Amino acid sequence: MENVVAIKHLNKTFQNPDIVAIDDLNLELPHGEVVGLVGPDGAGKTTLIRLLLGLLKPSGGDIAVLGLNPLTQTHQLHQIIGYMPQKFGLYEDLSIAENMDLYADLKELTPEERRQQFDWLLKFTGLAPFVKRLAGRLSGGMKQKLGLGCTLLGNPRFLLLDEPGVGVDPISRRELMKMVYSLRDKGITVLWSTSYLDEAEKFDRVLLLNDGKLIFNGNPKELTGRIAGRVFQTADTANPRQTLRRLMQSKAPLTDAVIYGQSVRTVLQKDILPAALDVALRPITPRFEDAVIDILGGSPMQPSEIAEQIDVGNIPDIVINADNLTKKYGDFTAAQNISFKIRRGEIFGLLGPNGAGKSTTFKMLCGLAKPTAGQGYILGTDMIKNPEKARAFLGYMAQKFSLFSTLSVMQNLKFFSGIYGLRGHKRENRIRQMIDIFELGPYLKQPAGNLPLGFKQRLALACAIMHNPPILFLDEPTSGVDPLTRREFWNHINSMVEKGVTVMVTTHFMDEAEYCDRIALIYQGQAIKIGTPDELKKQGETMEDAFIRLINEYQPEAAA
Amino acid sequence: MRILKALVYKEFLQIIRDPSSILTAFILPFILITIFATAINLDNNAIETGLVLEGDRQQVNNIIGAFDGSRYLTVTRYDNRKAAQEALTRGDIRALVIMPGNLAKDMATGQAAAVQIITDASDPNIALFAAAYVQGIVATAQKIMIETGASEKKSDIIIEQVAWYNPELKSRYFILPSSIAIIMTLIGMLLTALVIAREWERGTMESLLTTKASKLQIILAKYISYYCLAILSAVFCTFLCVIVFDVPFRGSLWVYFITSSLFLFVSIGMGCLISTLTRNQFLASVAAAMFGFLPAVILSGGLFEISSMPHIIQVLTNIIPATHFVPIIKNLFMAGDIWPIIWYESLNLLIFGLILFALLYKVTKERLE
């Protein structure tokens, strides 16, 4: 039998010929596997899927999908494949049943086929009790199942799912994965694209894309096998950041080192422990992300110099105090009685799926949303009564690095220093410092929108800390960013925290929570658990395991 | 056929469940028509007019009598130009008529008689009306003087005012039918401009493109469903005009229906084209307002007379579809079935509609690029 996908020397460029979306890609996929298409935003995942569907035209090379040419045999191809685009491709004003009817009609199912497939799909997705509900009123997880259900109409042989896990809580994501594997057992091949590296280990096969290049194709265990014996963990300490700094400064041949709860994970360049190391290491099982860092050439191993100039001064021990913060929009409670205290020099994470209430809590604490009840204090200043005064203590980095993309790097720096009230010599010195620390020199005249992602992130951070704030608020700072850029970012953050800067960060990456000193798990508007990462996890659990267990313990019916 | 039916049904469900489409199709027209009918008043009852007589009153007595007798002008007399011009500047009067000393003599001898009319053109409509009335009054007076053979002889001047199609000179009689044309542009374009862009934004277009639905079916489904909505809206507007605001309708309903359908064919085509080209609801709505709604209001001849525009603009108005529908609908309401206009403009609309449909078919891609 022929391969599901056969690609030879595939190239794809868009209007700007300098940006290569797909770069000389060769690929053969056999039947009956669940294939993960993994890579950061902009790696070319969606472009590849669209090329396979015939929705985009290749700039060069050959593609065959199920033996068909997607460009010339588009209609035949569409009859035997199923495609779920990002955001699931559902009509929000239509009910579950109406969405399914529409897609059944569009795929010209006979009444007999329709009856059979509806029965099976409604049972399979567990959506039978909700058929009259409008798709727009469904939770992320239910939308995802409905999207999958509509995609499965017509019994496709090959399923392409574009980022099905985005905006969905981890429980639903796991259920979907289970469903997909039961489909594989019926002989369907599945291509599942994701930017979550921790999801990759679950696939039969992983295609790792970076900058349009296929840098790995095979079983994820094969990739982690390459670094077997090279991954180590330090003992738990009260200050893992110090351990990390010592590791970095030891000049030992390291590929990667990241904070992991109270300890540090590290990947060595060779599988021999360097003799000179004064930090005790014990070997642990490699993760997929470790292997990706290794294949990408390793992460930066110099401690950041960003904090050299930072002086937070004399500030109280309790920096942020959230006291029963509650926010209601009509009869919808976005956040309910959320309380926590953040101490000086702590990284505090708000962890939860999209829509859980992280951003609402966040916005209440930086004065962008007025709480329905409860209080928030920043360095003792009431955030509700004195938002301007309290905000002066904050450096804020919004989601997606809200820079002015048409202004140059220099203009952005000047603008942000201006709105933070820096004037004259002080302003010029500060801008010069930022340029030096973040090595922005060569890019000063470029529009911020054209910067490489890593530099965008540096610039956004530079703009947020221009006024030397003792507190940093980071909203999804590394969403969609490749793991190397993410490490570089955390390297800067860690060095600032060592100098006493306090950080509050939101994230929906479960593994990123490991970098935090303490985490609040936010689920359905409530902080269901607050503690250190190690307190939250039981022995051998990943953060996602722990999250799912804690949700189930908190509200057993949520798992049903 | 089954696919088309399913797509049309889907569009209907979306229309019914989306409050904004009901708002645009019924509430917005209601507000617009009420505004056009009541707030925009181009009526010219009793325009304040000043009169300065520089010669002997005796000689032009009959003309002055005509002014005093007019229902449409309220005449105030001023002793000299200066006082009158000041009154005009203050806004006490909207028009000023100056009769020079030799007026009566010129009229009697058949020479060109100069009457100066100064109007306050800040409201061009009132200015135009005032000027027209004054000219009418003077011309009538002169005609009667010639017919009676002498200016010496005193004769009563009877002014007969005739206005075709709008004998009562109520502006809403001609504004409201035009406003239906404007509203149909709005509904046909604005709603459809949003819907294709919405499918792109929500990612549903990508799903549709991987089903058996062809681009012709996707396009036709939009045309059919939004045509139905727009024609309902047109019926509603017509009902408002005829029943609530008492505008007479003198043409045939079936001609009205067919020409309206033609016009909607054009409007929906423009909306879909904008939507397909922009793929973005915000851009599409701005483009629909710029290229559809505003030209329909300003340049279609619905509110502002095309013949009083500069020549180059007059030529430009021809490329605006509403320009070709406004004469049809105005005549249907005020005059009846004027066949030469109906045939000619319907043909124009048909050509517009077919060109737009062909363009739309061409720019709609079955791929994403």
Image (tube, grey):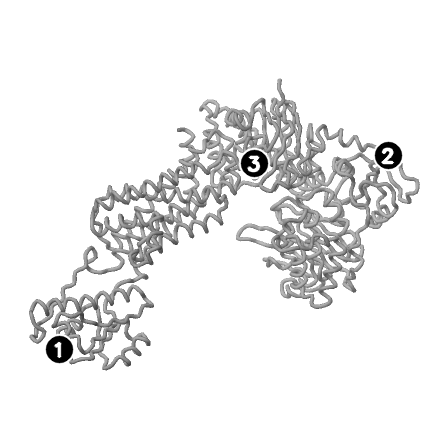
Distance, label 3 to label 2, CA atoms, is 42 Å
Q: Chain of mark 2?
A: A
Q: Measuring from the top left, give residue B283's x and y in whole percent.
A: 49, 49
CA–CA distance in space, label 2 to label 1: 122 Å
Residue ranking furthest to the right: A275
What amino acid is at disc 3? Pro
Quadrant assignment, res A81: top right
Q: Which residue is mark 2?
A: A271
Q: How many marks?
A: 3
Asked if residue B114 lies left or right of residue B36, the reply is left
Q: Quadrant of the C terminus of chain A?
A: top right
Asked if one can make out residue A528 in the rendered structure from this viewpoint, the answer is no
- Secondary structure at numbered mark 2: loop
Q: Secondary structure at mark 1?
A: helix
Badge 3 marks a residue whose secondary structure is loop
Which residue in the protein does label 3 denote? A85
Disc 3: CA contacts within 10 A as few (<14), some (14-19) or many (>=20) = many
Circle 1 residue? B59
Q: Are marks 2 and 1 on the same chain?
A: no
